[in-house]
Image: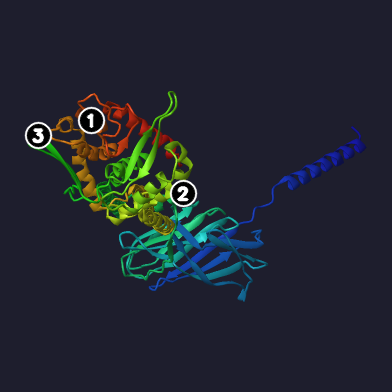
Amino acid sequence: MSTATTTWTKRLLAGLAICVGFCVATAAPAQAATADSVDVQAALTSDGRLKVEQTITLGPDSGVATWSQDLATRMDRDGQRYTYTVADLRVEADGADVGVTSTPKAESETVSFSVGQSRQLVLSYTVTGTTITTVDNKIRFVWGLLDHVNTPVTAVSGRVEVPAGAVNYDCLAGVVGALGSCSTYGAGTHGDLAMSFTQNSLSSDQVVQADILFDEGTVAVTEQVSTIWSLGKAMSLTGTPLGILIGVVVCGGLLLFAWSRRIASAGYDGTPQPIAQLTTTGGRWQFTTESTARPGMIGTLVDAKVDPADIVATILDLAVRGHLLITEVATPRYQSPDWVFTRLDGPDKLREYESHLIEALTRGGSVSQLSTELDRDMASIQDQLYAELRGVGWFSRCPNAKSPLVTWAWAAVAVASAVTVFLVAFTSFGLTGLALVGLAIVALLLAFQARAVTPRGAAVYAGLQQLSAALHDESVASTQTGQTLGEISRVLPYAVVLGGWDRWLKAIVDLDTDEEEDSTDLSWYHAPTGWHMADLPASLDAFITVVTGRLFSRS
């Protein structure tokens, strides 16, 4: 090989070596920014105030241009929010102050500052709120001495000075939520109350935390605590909330039960007040009534409303008492039966609703012609009948009017709802509030069921049960020793509203033992020629049907 060839080959190899070296040099990653060490000197005073001085040491090739770390502003634990107050924040480098930028976050603030050419910087601050009370009345001090630094730290060391009274020391490091013990820590030896610690390395997502427990009264409690709202906490079923809930449900339930019983009984004390009696003595019955015992009023008391049966009973009663004559009109075959009313001067005084009814019935024309005019009077007659029951003390109000208890019950629901909103928002007694709402709703339902009847009305109603039983007693109706048509007729209007109608009609029919016509035998009901007493049941049934269906067509 010639000398020229050898020289060219050496130059080529040298060039290749230079290129490979350059490629390797450019491909090698740049050294990551790292802090050499951080030394933390903290002192907790007996008044619960924490002072921290943190010395940051950076190597000549650290690559750190800006330093940042987090300082906690709050901590959530066991449903409580503890707030910290950081003050006197200062950074020094080479004896001069360095500008600090603070950026708030959800549970901390990030402090950052420019490092410049400095190799050692001192960050200092004070904190209050780090001493809190535990459930066993101990005092717990917790603070993140170095928290989420923006660059890894090769070594962390420090010392936490504390007052006398510490019973447990702990130094934790790692990712929040999965903390472990620091590399080394110790305290309480040789009379030294301070806790010293080291952590071999700390990445940017990790924290070094001091956790020290004190006896009660050794350090001032500086906690700034508030309750964190949660549905589970608001609806607590433990301890005092559970006890109060049970008490409210039991007491409220008993009160509502007692109230429901009173509503059902209308305050009735168990002593009936008979205002009409049907008694039998020596094979003869006797029917006696008080002046307030009008059939229409009794029927209204029984079902708490004025219905057609009450008006029909009133018409028959007015006729039997001699104030009205009912005359059945002779009508062609296949034509509906019809009646006319004639006003008479009866022996007793009429009530307002009775006078109004007679006036409406006797304006002229037959039953089939009075429909439109009578319908206009029925609303007034109904109101007057209700007024009569209030006047005699059987009703406290008009039965079709809303009970004032409903208004009070709605108010109770509104108040209970407002109380519940408050309890759910600010306390752990939310279920107690819901129980109050439930009890108020039950009270509202009961209020809608509250009857207008008074205790006196309830006593009268109880007395009417005895009369109703007698009217249904076939043996009483069939007892006719010396009874007259007038006596039996007096019972008929009451049988319309209390029952036994068919039995008492039969009693009247059974009194007729001759073959002669009876068209005028009854003082209160006249019929066409050829009418017999045996036709009375059919005539009155038709009368009731027509009056009910035709005259009282009001809504």
The residue that appears at 27% across and 55% down in the rendered structure is 393
> Colour scheme in the image?
rainbow
Residue 448 in the image: state x and y as whole percent: 36, 48
Q: Label 1, on which residue?
A: 503
Quarter of the image for residue 80 reads: bottom left
Q: Split into 4 quadrants, where in the image is the N terminus? A: top right
The residue that appears at 30% across and 31% down in the rendered structure is 519
Residue closest to the eye, 535 or 260: 535
Badge number at residue 518: none
- Within 10 Å of disc 3 (Cα), the crowding (few <14, some 14-19, many 20+) is few
Q: Label 3, on which residue?
A: 283
Residue closest to the eye, 347 or 145: 347
Which SS class for mark 2? loop
Q: Earlier in the sequence, mark 2 or mark 1?
A: 2
Marks 2 & 3, CB-CB < 8 Å contact: no
Which SS class for mark 3? loop
Quarter of the image for residue 508 reads: top left
Q: How far is mark 3 from mark 1, CA to CA?
A: 17 Å
Residue 398 in the image: state x and y as whole percent: 36, 52
Q: Earlier in the sequence, mark 2 or mark 3?
A: 2
Residue 101 makes an appearance in the image = yes
Q: Label 2, on which residue?
A: 178
Q: How far is mark 2 from mark 3, CA to CA?
A: 101 Å
- Within 10 Å of disc 2 (Cα), the crowding (few <14, some 14-19, many 20+) is few
- Tell me which amino acid carries mark 1: Arg
Q: How far is mark 2 from mark 1, CA to CA?
A: 93 Å
Which SS class for mark 1? helix
- Tell me which amino acid carries mark 2: Ala
Q: Earlier in the sequence, mark 3 or mark 1?
A: 3
